[in-house]
Image (spheres, helix red, strand yellow):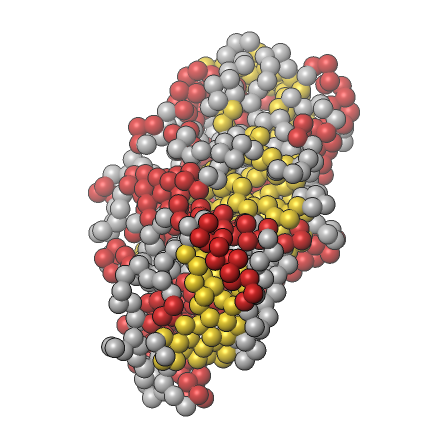
């Protein structure tokens, strides 16, 4: 039998030779990392096997260990220096734990499992997880996004002792679909149109075939995403509260269930922890996995039935790093032995490290009692999925991996899971923040058409229609509504079987803001997500958030500086909204090496969240209900045009990005929620991208009527020069609310003391009309605006 592994000499290599070895083997380990590896094996007085080097590289990879967020950062912001020990602990974990202490019993699990859980009711808990599959999707859009969604579904399936996936979300960041091919500054880069179509089809096919509704999401466009598209996939789940806690112990059998192991997905974790380049499509295609949703559906059914029967002690998904990550982490607190020759293979001839590190999909790893193996095997036969006993846990604290009688890996967990701490430099310099700009007031109708037709605003309906958003039969608020079922909503609501409560889902992403004010991007994005959850009916005191970050090169101080400022913003927002982060993920090195230098994506923060809807009558939606109702604007509108769609279209630079007072906004949202619970709200729409003019038009897309606006009645603290500001400013904390005239007095009483004013009414005329101090400044046909909005993506998809 030919050898399936080899020893790699490292003990006598120079520092340069160690770094070259890392590059040759595509380990994505730094010089300093390799020197620590060398010391480990000098201490063991032997050379490592290739399996051990691959296991260490996977375990220490940025994708798996999140070393940028755990690094010691020396940060200089506008000349002021500070040292930060772990961005994650300082700005995400610690604030969230402070909030959890304030709200005992709400968060049932966070930061210790595949996903975090919040209380739904006395018996059930809900969870949400979102991850990225950026590099694979850049190389193979269909397979990359297909397995991205499959992987996050397994995250939910591996949370607790097996949560049931009940809803999906997806957020995509692409180059514009009309990008001229000659504008792409690198060879062998897939055109954004091909990326978009492949990614959407990949997510569609996996979610639909799994029978999980896709109900929430967003799409952003920016030229830098041509080279590094971002593909966020998320899944929500539900679980009995008694099945959340799990604990490993010695003496358990380690089994694999689901798909077979092959050569797809080799070095996926380390591949995702490095930059892309012109050679990536040719050299790294084996890092992309191949999905099979039907196999995963069988695995899902097996897991849920095994959980119901009490047959699972511990489980996790088999994703990045394959068995190395899943079994390695599972055995990290105990130790154990695994036998690779037992793993069912897609094809013969895989060598040791390939079997152990392959990221072939649809696999789960479980720890079970030996006595339960016969019943588990019967279940596997019933659901027609493959079950294999890979090994067992013990009390040695050592991970031992055997292959055909040879010990191919023997690593002490204390060393394997203790990656070196990175030391990084970051710099941030505030830019100008202009207000009081002389904006044109005589082109507002044309400006609204331009904004409405922009890729940032246009309807996502052609893509939404690819997804089944009603499978499982529990979608209370769909992505599109209105008389023609094509008007946009702020979030979604999922009914939960066995509960009188429901789950709200929403997300927000504002990468344009981060280009000039990443702190404001952080607070504003959290604010928008929280606002949308409350708008679709969530109790403001029952919200759990997710943080997902993507950026270019984190070792470039100016790039890292933007992340540091953003993370500070989301920490402040979480504390002020009393909404903890229960899970999250980051993806760095989203930059592309060209002959002219690296192209970094904008620092991109996605905030998604779930909330508890206590009463399903609180679910109102964002579409205008009547043509004789009153419209109220809640929240202040300010001269903050930075980062807005209007400013980008007009070429306005250095304008002030909206600033967010989360404390004031949260008080405002609670007052709105009180009005909602009292039955005083017909419908309400979040004012975000595009501003008030876009929000009003989108409400009118319901088909019920038009809207008249009085800009001079809009609440403001600072005012403005041009009516373009109240129409197109994207100031945070604002809600456009529809109220029955008979309930107006009671609504105003409920909102007394807060910035809230009657600014208009619904009309029978299907038009958007805006007046400023009695002078009409804008008149637009709803039908004309809707045609621009509705058909914006149609030619490309």
Residue found at the very far bottom of the displayed protein: 45
Quadrant of the rendered image containing residue 25: bottom left
Seen in the picture, residue 277 relative to 532 is either above or below; the reply is below
Measured as percent of width and height from the top left, residue 58 is found at 41, 68
Instruction: Name the residue located 34 percent from the left edge and 76 percent from the top edge.
Output: 404
Q: Total of numbered circles in the picture?
A: 0
Q: Left or right of 224: which side holds 581? A: right
Taking depth in this image into account, of 784 and 284 the one nearest to the observer is 284
Q: Which quadrant of the figure has residue 673? A: top right
Res 371 visible = yes
The N terminus, quarter of image: bottom left
Say whether residue 36 is left or right of residue 375: left
Closer to us: 34 or 453 = 34
Residue at x-position 50% and y-position 31%: 470
Q: Residue at x 27, y 61 (%)?
A: 347
Q: Quadrant of the C terminus?
A: top left
Q: Position of residue 340 (x, y in %)?
A: 38, 70
Whether residue 551 is visible: no
Residue at point 46% right, 70% down? Answer: 391
> Is 3 or 229 nearer to us in this picture?
3
The percent coordinates of residue 213 (x first, y second) are 48, 37
Query: Which sits in the foreground, 451 or 53?
Result: 53
Q: Residue 136: where, in percent of width, then height? A: 34, 53
Image height of 692 relative to 543, above or below: above
Give the side of residue 277 with respect to residue 485, left or right.
left
In this image, 201 relative to 98: left or right? left
Q: Is residue 511 above or below residue 284?
A: above
């Amino acid at each position: 039998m030919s050898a399936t592994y080899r020893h790699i000499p490292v003990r006598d290599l120079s520092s340069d030779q160690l770094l070259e070895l890392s590059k040759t083997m595509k380990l994505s380990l730094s010089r300093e990392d390799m020197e620590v590896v060398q010391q480990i094996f000098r201490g063991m007085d032997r050379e490592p096997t290739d399996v051990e080097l691959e296991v260490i590289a996977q375990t220490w990879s940025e994708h798996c260990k999140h070393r940028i967020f755990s690094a010691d950062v020396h940060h200089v912001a506008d000349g002021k220096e500070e040292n930060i020990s772990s961005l994650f602990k300082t700005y995400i974990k610690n604030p969230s734990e402070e909030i959890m202490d304030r709200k005992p019993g709400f968060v049932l699990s966070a930061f210790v499992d595949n996903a975090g859980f919040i209380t739904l009711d006395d018996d059930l808990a809900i969870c949400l997880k979102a991850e990225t599959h950026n590099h694979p999707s850049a190389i193979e859009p269909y397979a990359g996004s297909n397995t991205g969604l499959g992987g996050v579904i397994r995250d939910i399936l591996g949370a607790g002792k097996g949560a049931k996936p009940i809803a999906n979300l997806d957020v995509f960041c692409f180059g514009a679909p009309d990008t001229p091919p000659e504008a792409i500054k690198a060879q062998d880069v897939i055109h954004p149109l091909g990326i978009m179509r492949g990614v959407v089809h990949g997510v569609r096919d996996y979610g639909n075939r799994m029978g999980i509704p896709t109900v929430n999401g967003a799409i952003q466009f920016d030229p830098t995403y041509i080279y590094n598209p971002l593909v966020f996939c998320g899944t929500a789940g539900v679980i009995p509260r008694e099945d959340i806690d799990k604990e490993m112990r010695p003496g358990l059998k380690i089994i694999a269930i689901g798909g077979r192991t092959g050569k797809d997905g080799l070095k996926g974790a380390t591949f995702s922890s490095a930059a892309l380049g012109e050679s990536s499509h040719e050299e790294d295609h084996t890092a992309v996995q191949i999905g099979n949703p039907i196999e995963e559906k069988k695995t899902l059914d097996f897991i849920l039935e095994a959980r119901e029967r009490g047959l699972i002690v511990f489980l996790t998904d088999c994703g990045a790093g394959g068995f190395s990550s899943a079994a390695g982490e599972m055995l990290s607190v105990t130790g154990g032995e695994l036998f690779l020759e037992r793993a069912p293979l897609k094809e013969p001839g895989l060598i040791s490290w390939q079997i152990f590190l392959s990221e072939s999909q649809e696999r789960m790893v479980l720890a079970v009692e030996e006595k339960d193996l016969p019943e588990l095997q019967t279940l596997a036969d019933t659901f027609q999925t493959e079950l294999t006993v890979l090994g067992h846990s013990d009390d040695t604290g050592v991970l031992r991996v055997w292959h055909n009688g040879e010990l191919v890996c023997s690593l002490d967990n204390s060393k394997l899971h203790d990656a070196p701490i990175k030391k990084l430099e970051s710099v941030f310099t505030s830019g100008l923040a202009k207000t009081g700009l002389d904006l044109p007031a005589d082109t507002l109708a044309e400006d609204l058409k331009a904004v409405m037709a922009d890729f940032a605003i246009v309807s996502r309906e052609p893509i939404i229609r690819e997804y089944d958003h009603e499978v499982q039969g529990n979608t209370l608020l769909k992505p599109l509504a209105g008389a023609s079922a094509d008007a946009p909503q702020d979030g979604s609501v999922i009914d939960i079987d066995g509960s009188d409560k429901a789950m709200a889902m929403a997300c927000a992403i504002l990468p344009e803001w981060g280009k000039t004010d990443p702190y404001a991007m952080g607070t504003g994005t959290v604010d928008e997500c929280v606002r949308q959850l409350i708008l679709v009916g969530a109790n403001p005191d029952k919200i759990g958030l997710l943080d997902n970050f993507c950026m270019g090169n984190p070792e470039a101080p100016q790039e890292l500086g933007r992340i540091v400022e953003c993370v500070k913003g989301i920490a402040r927002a979480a504390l002020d909204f009393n909404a903890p982060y229960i899970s999250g993920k980051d993806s760095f090195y989203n930059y592309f090496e060209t002959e002219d230098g690296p192209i970094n994506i904008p620092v991109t923060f996605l905030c998604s969240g779930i909330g508890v809807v206590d009463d399903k009558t609180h679910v109102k939606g964002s579409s205008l209900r009547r043509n004789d109702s009153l419209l109220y604007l809640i929240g202040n509108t300010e001269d903050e045009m930075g980062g807005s769609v209007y400013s980008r279209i007009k070429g306005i630079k250095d304008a002030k990005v909206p600033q967010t007072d989360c404390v004031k906004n949260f008080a405002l949202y609670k007052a709105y929620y009180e009005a909602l619970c009292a039955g005083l709200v017909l419908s309400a729409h979040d004012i975000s991208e595009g501003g008030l003019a876009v929000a009003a038009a989108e409400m009118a897309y319901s088909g019920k009527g038009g809207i008249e606006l009085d800009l001079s009645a809009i609440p403001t603290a600072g005012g403005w020069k041009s009516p373009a500001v109240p129409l197109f400013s994207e100031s945070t904390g604002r809600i456009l609310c529809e109220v029955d005239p008979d309930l107006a007095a009671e609504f105003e009483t409920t909102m007394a003391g807060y910035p809230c004013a009657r600014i208009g009414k619904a009309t029978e005329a299907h038009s958007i009309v805006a007046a400023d101090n009695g002078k009409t400044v804008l008149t637009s046909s709803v039908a004309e605006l809707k045609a621009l909005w509705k058909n914006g993506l149609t030619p490309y998809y």
